[in-house]
Amino acid sequence: MIRFGPQNLRIPRFEKPVYVVAGGLTDYRKNYREKNTCELCTAALRMAVEENDLKVEPEQLRRMVNWVVYSQFADHFGDQLLAAAKVHDYLGFDPLGNIEVKTGGATGGSAVLAAAQAVASGYADCVPVVGWERMDEVSTKVGNSYIASAACKDFESELGWMYAAYYALMAQRYQYENNVPRETLAKIACKNHEYAYYSPFAQNPGKYTVQDILNNEIVSDPLSFLECCVMSVGAAVLILCDEAVAHKLSDNPVQLKAICGGTHTLRTADRRHMPILLLPNETEATYKDYFTGKRHEWPGFSSFLASRMAAYLAYNMAGIKDPVADFDLLETHDAFTISDVQTYEDIGLRPYGRGREFIESGDAYFEGRLPTNLSGGLIGTMHAVGATGIFQLVEVLWQLQGKYDKFHGDPKMWERFGKKKPADWKSLQLKNPRRGCAISHAGTGSHVTCAILEKA
């Protein structure tokens, strides 16, 4: 049994405030033959520096950068070791220092965490975070095997070399423990595909019914194709600064109030039982009857300790008391519908065992109490892995700055990516949002970051 020491749960702090001033995205596709990796990263950076209402010219901003963080999940896809060095040179940042981060599916979130640490410590005061994935130079089967290598190859990879198989087992266990109907998971897929329908960046948009999801071809029982994230090609950029630089660059910077990480064993069978780590909105009474049913231990096989750890630290760092009340929007790492409902519980949107209530209550929808994955998420829009955690924060940033319509509603943005804006497009811009959260998640819960953005 894991027992925390007092310093294990020390709440992180920034020595200097950290701000986000701009974000940029490419669109996301299954295949992107028109542009190589460096061109995709350049396009995302160009959007960040040229289309976010910054107060300086692009060349002036380039001269203000003093550290860069890169995010790529796997060298295997692009068949290029030290790809970050190539991108760094192509973006015009050579010979400035840089690092490349890799923590599986949480690579984007971890890269933002590394950049925030650089700014918060005073090491740097203007840090672009650039993430991408090149997943179209191998077949889908080979790509799945590469991704599956982020689980324990000694034991779990042999289950089928496909992440859907890992999460299907979790789904079966979760449904058994909590009596969750298939329709609940299908609702998550319907919501996220529909929100992707309103995004010019989206790879897999669509308007589906619950029955469409349930009747869709099964990937790994019980998960259908429409309940799984997409393999994507694309890039994303986020620019972090200290307070002084942020206000030189933008009249509307957003503060990164917290970003924290948690981990758990790579092999799920190694995960030991422990007392539930309580979030600020929970007490011991919350779980007084929890272990009297089918659930006998925590975190077990159906909860993510890494998510709970990251949320615990970030909530306490940012002063969050109740996530549903304190956040105005949320981006989860919805790699699969089952991981989404698990995350609802891990980050305290509902107590353990009651995650289904968050989606079934309507809270998760646009105009609900906590709209979730208005970007379309990984199921509807993208999972270009190294870009994913950055993409989530770009979408949160634009919502807080009131720029959703600018980047999603302009017909010229759709035309830029060879698309036509739907005649029934609608704005998902929230009314005066103040605070948003994004969860970046790896493997079967091996690494997770929780980031909280707030209007300055």
Image: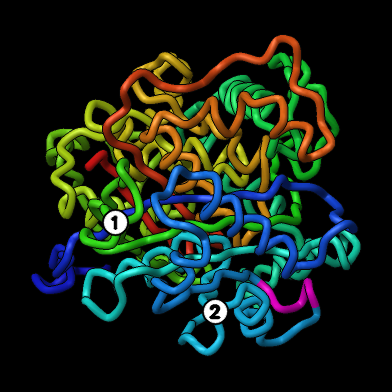
Q: Secondary structure at mark 1?
A: helix
- Front position in the image: 90 or 257: 90
Disc 1 marks which residue?
248
Which of the numbered marks, if any, corresponds to residue 93? Answer: 2
Q: Quadrant of residue 66?
A: bottom left
Badge 2 amino acid: Phe
Spatial CA distance of label 2 from label 1 is 20 Å
Image: magenta residue range = 74-78
Q: Which mark is residue 118?
A: none
> Which percent across, then down, holds residue 293?
36, 34
307 is within the stretch colored magenta: no
Q: What residue is shown at x 51% (from left), y 76% (from top)? A: 101
Which of 81 and 413 lies nearest the eye of the viewer? 413
Place residue 123 in its image quadrant: bottom left
Amino acid carrying mark 1 in the image: Lys
* Dot 2: element: loop
| Residue 261 placement (x, y as % from top left) | 34, 63
Residues 263 and 289: in front is 263
Q: Is residue 187 above or below residue 1?
A: above
Residue extending furthest toward the bottom: 95
Q: Residue at x 72, y 70 (%)?
A: 38
Mark 1: few/some/many CA within 10 Å (<14, 14-19, 20+): few
Residue 420 locus on image (x, y percent): 80, 25
| Residue 12 seen in this snapshot | no
Residue 299 located left or right of residue 9 = right
Give the class, few, some or many, for how many residues have Cα within 10 Å of label 2's Cα (few <14, many ≥20): some
The correct choice, above or below, for 303 with respect to 73 in the image is above
Outermost residue to the top = 424
